Image (spheres, grey):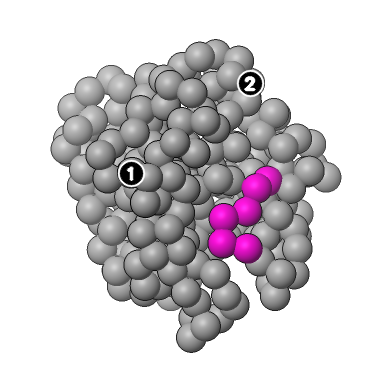
Amino acid sequence: MELYIIRHAESENNAGPEDERTEDPSLSPLGYQQAECLVNRIRHLRPTRILVSPFLRTLETIEPYIRKTGQVTEAWIDIHEQGGVMAGVGEDNYEGRPGMKRSEIELKIPGIQIGNRIDEEGWWKSRPWEDYQSTQTRAERVCEELYKDFAHSSERVLLITHGMFMRFLVGAFLKLSGLGKDHIHLFANTSVTQFFITPTTTHLGLMNCTRHLPETWITGTDRRPYCSGENVIEDD
């Protein structure tokens, strides 16, 4: 299997101040441009399976590619952002929110494949904030499921997910001790990270690659420019 993990394009939350964040933001104007740039990059990757988080910003990131190619996409709750769907600022003030309904996701990407866990009550269902250890456990579960389903195959699997969750997930694939977020640095918006995976080996191919973007369009959660291959694995 070839696995490609892509962070969503810049959201309105990424672009704005923290105290103005909303529970499920759209892409920013720059984010929509980044998503359009991502189309040809994904074409070059030639994915055979596309799995996308059910947040609005991830759906809007893949929408231009789906619109132009018609390739089937699957919504996968387990690759959502760390924490879940929350309103408020600061862990002590977060309140769970429902998340997008099944009909809302279908309207965003007609024909998207949606499992039974997503219904008209929303996919997050106003659960409490997901703590870091729970996120680590989820990342390890996603890693195990991808190995089980695809490691023996020639599939080219593409995940459209989130910056913080990517830090946990990449750490799980690299078998780093403790929490992945403590070892992995920030990922740029629409950056591509690649693994080559067999039943017995896991090789990292690309990390935080943004060569499909103009340099001035490369942003991370703190809006500083990034370079492909910037120091992304921190020393203990």
Q: 62 or 207: nearer the eye?
A: 62
Looking at the rendered structure, the secondary structure element under dot 2 is: helix
Horizontal arrangement in the rendering, residue 67 relative to residue 158 (left or right)? right
Q: Position of residue 127 (x, y in %)?
A: 35, 67
Quarter of the rendering occupied by the C terminus: bottom left
Q: Position of residue 175 (x, y in %)?
A: 28, 58
Residue 49 visible in this rendered orientation of the protein: yes
Horizontal arrangement in the rendering, residue 173 relative to residue 82 (left or right)? left
Q: Main secondary structure of the magenta part?
A: loop
Residue 228 numbered mark, or none: none
Q: Position of residue 148 (x, y in %)?
A: 16, 38
Identify the residue at horizontal 46%, vertical 31% (top origin): 106
In the depicted structure, whether residue 186 falls above or below residue 41: below
Q: Which residues are magenta?
A: 22-27
Mark 2 Cα shell of 10 Å, populated few (<14), some (14-19), many (≥20): few
Looking at the rendered structure, the secondary structure element under dot 1 is: loop
Identify the residue at horizontal 28%, vertical 20% (top origin): 154
Label 1 – label 2 distance at C-alpha? 30 Å
Residue lying at the far right of the rendered structure: 216
Q: 147 or 203: nearer the eye?
A: 147
Sequence-wise, which precedes: disc 1 or disc 2? Answer: 2
Mark 1 Cα shell of 10 Å, populated few (<14), some (14-19), many (≥20): many
- In the rendered structure, does residue 120 fall within the stretch colored magenta? no
Residue 118 numbered mark, or none: 1
Q: 188 or 71: nearer the eye?
A: 71
In the rendered image, which residue does mark 2 sit on?
A: 40
Q: Position of residue 229 (x, y in %)?
A: 60, 48
**Type of amino acid at the residue the image marks with label 2:** Asn
**Type of amino acid at the residue the image marks with label 1:** Ile
